[in-house]
Amino acid sequence: MVRALSKNKQESIKSLILKSKTYSVIMERISNLKKSTLNRYANKFSPGRVTANPGWKTVLSVTTKSYIRKQIVNGTLKTAKAVHKYLVCTGHKISYSGTIKVMKSMNFHAKIKVKKPLLTKVQKARQLAWAEEHKNWTSDDWRRMVFSGETKVSVYGSDGCKYFWSRPDDKLQPHHLDLTVEGGGGSIMVWGCITYDGPGYACWISEGTMKASDYVGTLSKTLMDSLEYYGYNPQDIYFQQDNDPKHTSKLARQ
């Protein structure tokens, strides 16, 4: 029958295991400890522990770094966790924080993804065709362009990311929180336009679905007021809008 280790010795082993110490270090500090016994306690105290073995590689080769760099750039390895998992699976003894240090040493830095509309191939082709059609425009041509669009404006707070700075031991403070209200606080839809000389007027879009007649009312009032403010002749401008049905309706084109 295997004799159980003393409580103090078990606690010492547990502490070293949870600190991710290697088997050799633990066996050096705990006298008369067999590897099989250590392995049993390692499985008990840290089931997901990755133990060191002679096959581990502790230094990343130039080839490995080059491969990782390529996989990050082309999007195959999208996160630090993915890079860490790849390195561990290929026999490298490296922690998650160590992986991040390696990535930073290769000049990679974590950034927030920029949100962009999901475009189909057809939409991309149309945008490219539009760009090709206008690539030779002069500054005088662009002076006549007026862009328009709708956007959602949150009544309470921002939809964007928010950050705060604190030290590891700081207690959570009210200014560390991104406060929310039930239902998100509500939002409104706003229509606006922008000209070569500056932004035009904006107007609130009434609740519910905007109809073609509502859109025409917006053009006849807010757009015309904007053109008048900058001294533009409505007959001389290029008016740019998306292909929303109400924008391309027969009523709106009149």
Image (spheres, rainbow, N blue to C red):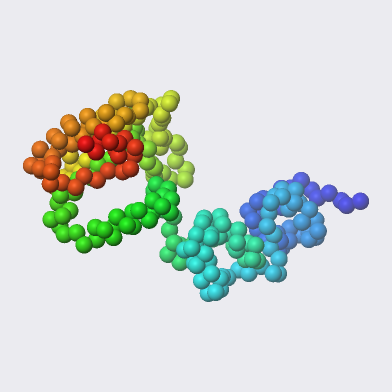
Quadrant where the image shows the C terminus: top left
Q: Position of residue 49 (x, y in %)?
A: 68, 54
Q: Position of residue 187 (x, y in %)?
A: 34, 29
Of residues 33 and 225, the one drawn nearer to the viewer in this rendering: 225
Q: Residue at horizontal 17%, vertical 31%?
A: 221
Q: Is residue 27 above or below residue 178?
A: below
- What is the quadrant of residue 29 in the picture? bottom right
- What is the quadrant of residue 148 in the picture? top left
Of residues 138 and 106, the one drawn nearer to the viewer in this rendering: 138
Q: Residue at horizontal 50%, vertical 67%?
A: 70
Q: Position of residue 73 (x, y in %)?
A: 47, 63
Q: Is residue 223 left or right of residue 19?
A: left
Q: Is residue 190 above or below residue 234?
A: above
- The answer to whether any part of residue 54 appears in the image is yes
Q: Is residue 15 left or right of residue 7?
A: left
Of residues 8 and 52, the one drawn nearer to the viewer in this rendering: 52
Of residues 88 and 42, the one drawn nearer to the viewer in this rendering: 88
